[in-house]
Amino acid sequence: MGADTSGRGVIRRAVKGQRRDVVVGSLLGAAHQTGEALVPVLIGLIVDRAVVRPDGGALAAWLVVLAVVYAMLSYGFRFGARAGERAAEQAAHQLRIDVVRRVLAPHGGAEAGRPPGALVNVATEDARRVGALNMALTLGIAAVVGVVAGAVLLLRASVPLGLLVLIGAPVLMALGHYLARPLEHRSEAEQERAAHASGVAADLVAGVRVLKGLRAERAAVARYRTTSQASREANVRAARAAALQTGLMLTLTGAFIALVALVGGRLVLSGSIGLGALVSAVGLALFLPGPISVLAWVGAELARARASAARIADVLATPGETTGGTAEPATPATGELRLHGLGHAGLDGIDLTVRPGEHLGIVVTDTADAATLLRCLARRCDPDRGRIELDGTPVTELAPAALRSALLVAEHDAQLFDGSLLDNVTAVAPAGADPRPAMDAAAVDEVAATLSGGTAGRIGERGSSLSGGQRQRVALARALAADRSVLVVHDPTTAVDAATEARIATGIRRARTGRTTVLVTSSPALLAATDRVVLIDGGTITAEAPHEDLVRDHPVYRTAVLT
């Protein structure tokens, strides 16, 4: 893919892409932390110079300085946090786009072995966690500045106290990183289980009608309950790891602050520092747990981001099912499709020429061979032997996106989307094209009549408000409205009644006049409307003639389409 698609590469791009906001947020956050560290020092100075020796004018002047510092730290916190949040959200958004672009890439492959719910989880929760690293980085840099500022100010008050902080803070940071390792492993397991649970839920929702028809609701619920419980247990383990890390860090931080206070108290008793310095030291000792705890939190966020980045990288680095060419289809396209010695899986030596503008039927006696043929035509895989040409150019030399702009394979199980009926039909139609001819050809007007809003009526997710036959008609109308030079359609009317099927057969022929159309089907009504039919039996072409001739003369064909 060119870009670094490792987990570190994902994090690097997420941070680098929002460098400006991270820098601005870090600088403003550093100003906030510096202001926080200055407050106890200023209070100590006020005690020494305006309280121990009462001086109203000095008190007023120092209070003005204190107010300015408060305004500075308030401004730094507000706008620094805004810049950090913007960097986090923009990085997460870009990662979501990267994941979705990879999933939708013409060369495919990203969805292999991953249920839709798992991909959704990667594109949402994992992207959010990696993006949140920008906010953590912004706060972490500011926290480091806060710790350093506190240490420097303590050094001015007392060298032993300053050295104690300078030595102790890095030790605490190292311990925080060490303690975050178990959290990273548990976070990865948690996300894997959550993604699996999402995938199972998506599958169950998609097949809810089938499950109800089979009366398999209990089995489905039991399956999801098992998956959900596993996800819950992973979440609990991750939460325990986070709680343990937080508790240990708080304990270590408290012990560290107690040690600072103890050393400071001994210095006061020995007369090494005055009352104001004591107030400053105590205030700084109370301030330091804040940035130190932020550093511990940053370590935990980094652990979570690493686990999520690895999952995103796994999707982005998935090899494509096909390699991409660079050529463009012939202009103007004639729509000639040729198969030369095509061999793949069950197919063996398929030689076929589909003439420009021809209306061809293909009957395949083995459903597995039909699926293989469609995969090769759609270029979701390349054949082991032979080649496929579009207008004289091998499809392997065509850019995948360019190929799909000329050749569309509308598969039997095409999915619809939540939205209006018209939006589904025009989803891939050329801009400004009239969708009515395609809708009439697929008898979608009858579907629109059943919706309260007509063509503007919503059909629900995956067309859940429609019957199986209605969904098929909408999917067919979408394929026809795409207006490709070559259209391959697989069994578009298996759930449609005979009268409607006859109407659709005539409609497809009319809508595709002058353009190449291939119908992979066993429907007599659709085949009767074709120019000729090719029979593929046993992986090879065994007959080729008009539908009526094959029905009369070929027993295998007659059995395939009439039984």
Image: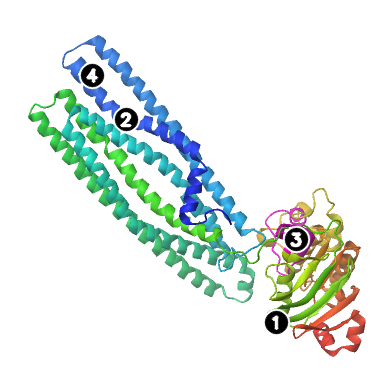
**Which is in the foreground here, disc 3 or disc 2?**
3
Mark 2, residues whose alpha carbon is within 10 Å: few (<14), some, or many (≥20)?
many
Relative to 107, residue 551 above or below: below
Relative to 409, residue 557 above or below: below
In the image, is 13 to the left or to the right of 402? left
Near-viewer residue (543 or 128): 543
- Label 1 SS: loop
Q: Tag on residue 196?
A: none
Which residue: 77% across, 62% down?
A: 474
Quadrant for the N terminus in the image: bottom right
| Residues marked 2 and 1 touching at CB (< 8 Å) | no
Q: Tag on residue 403?
A: 3
Question: Label 2: which residue?
Answer: 36
Q: Tag on residue 346?
A: 1
Looking at the image, tell me whether mark 3 or mark 4 is earlier in sequence order: 4
**Which is in the foreground here, disc 4 or disc 1?**
1
Amino acid type of the residue tagged 2 in the rendering: Glu
Question: Colour scheme in the image?
Answer: rainbow
- Determine the CA span between mark 3 and mark 2: 61 Å
Looking at the image, tell me whether mark 3 or mark 2 is earlier in sequence order: 2
Question: Which region is colored magenta?
Answer: 397-425
Mark 1, residues whose alpha carbon is within 10 Å: few (<14), some, or many (≥20)?
some
Looking at the image, tell me whether mark 4 or mark 2 is earlier in sequence order: 2
Question: Label 4: which residue?
Answer: 46
Amino acid type of the residue tagged 1 in the rendering: Gly
**Which is in the foreground here, disc 3 or disc 4?**
3
- Determine the CA span between mark 3 and mark 4: 77 Å
